[in-house]
Amino acid sequence: MPSKGPAMSTLESIRQPAVAGRFYTAVPARLRAEITGYLATPAAPKAKAYGVMVPHAGYVYSGAVCGRALASVDIPPVCLLLHTKHHLGGGALSLAQFQTWQTPLGPIETDGSLNKALASVPGVSASNVPHFLEHAAEVVLPFLQVLRPDVRIAVVSVSTSPLELLQRTAQGIAKAVVAHDQDVLLIASTDMNHYADEESTILKDKLALAALADFDAAAMLQVCQQQDISMCGAHATALMLETCQRLGATRVEVLEHTTSGAVSGDRDEVVGYASARVL
């Protein structure tokens, strides 16, 4: 009888929270109540969407924007999170291999069928390495748990990549989504411009958001490069846009735009936060 090979270790199969207690409270009841409050005021009437863009800072800064955006879309049985790659390791597009993601609200299971299909997409590599300490996907998960307790996920970190690679990868992801036996929502996790004064940040963000609203991933990446807009998840968002376009989406609706200065009162060095949905 052939060997089945070594079993996946707990470290490799269960992704423990990395930023609970820092980016958001680790107290389950408090966390659920806080998220429920954010979800109570959707940014727009709820609609079925192909994708949604949300920020990923600490909840005190961007939790309301994230929650109101997610409350504005139907959450299907499966969500694919595409996020900024803040940590080294893995490939340019790294597909997490954890079987379970743990949060203070409990476990979220990975969708094995989607993960298997994504692992075969050219340009996507399977690696947990960049995900262990990454917050960009983690902070979104508790919102999904409150909105849809039975949700399953797949998670891909996206670093700076040529548009041509993102377009080829989008084609493969779209095929995997179409072949799946349940609806899949794409979620792009990104913040906008970082650490400039508020006036400059708002102006820069508006340029990127205008391209986003035009459903033009190429223009969005181009303006971020030309105008030095430090939108950390620009490539993750571009991949989401390109994939949604191939799935049949026709328009993008920008939902909200604000900065950390609205909370901190510091207008000299802010981070921009925005949300959008793809319909």
Image: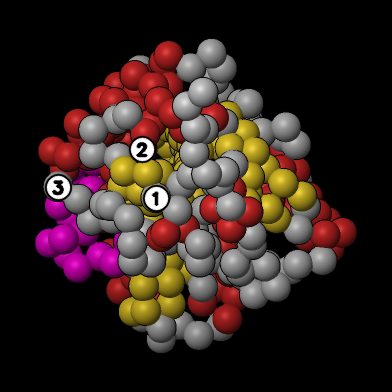
Assign the magenta stretch its main secondary structure: helix
Question: Which residue is tagged 2?
Answer: 240
Q: What residue type is labelled 3?
A: Pro
Question: Which residue is tagged 1?
Answer: 127
Question: Which residue is tagged 3?
Answer: 162
Q: Reply above or below: 250 against 164.
A: above
- Where does the image place residue 122, in percent across and percent down from the top left? 23, 33
| Residue plotted at (60% across, 75% down) | 263
Where disc 2 sits, the SS reads helix
Q: What residue type is labelled 1?
A: Ser
Q: Which of pointers 1 and 2 lies earlier in the amino acid sequence?
A: 1
Where disc 1 sits, the SS reads loop
Q: Residue 217 colored magenta? A: yes
Q: Reply above or below: 241 against 114.
A: below
Which is in the foreground here, disc 3 or disc 2? 3
Which is in the foreground here, disc 3 or disc 1? 1
Where disc 3 sits, the SS reads loop
Q: Which amino acid does label 2 sit on?
A: Met
Segment tinted magenta in the rendering? 212-231
Q: Nearer the viewer, residue 248 or 23?
A: 23
Look at the numbered discs 1 and 2 and tell me whether their residues touch, using CB distance below 8 Å: no
Task: Look at the image and tell me whether residue 251 can be seen.
Answer: no
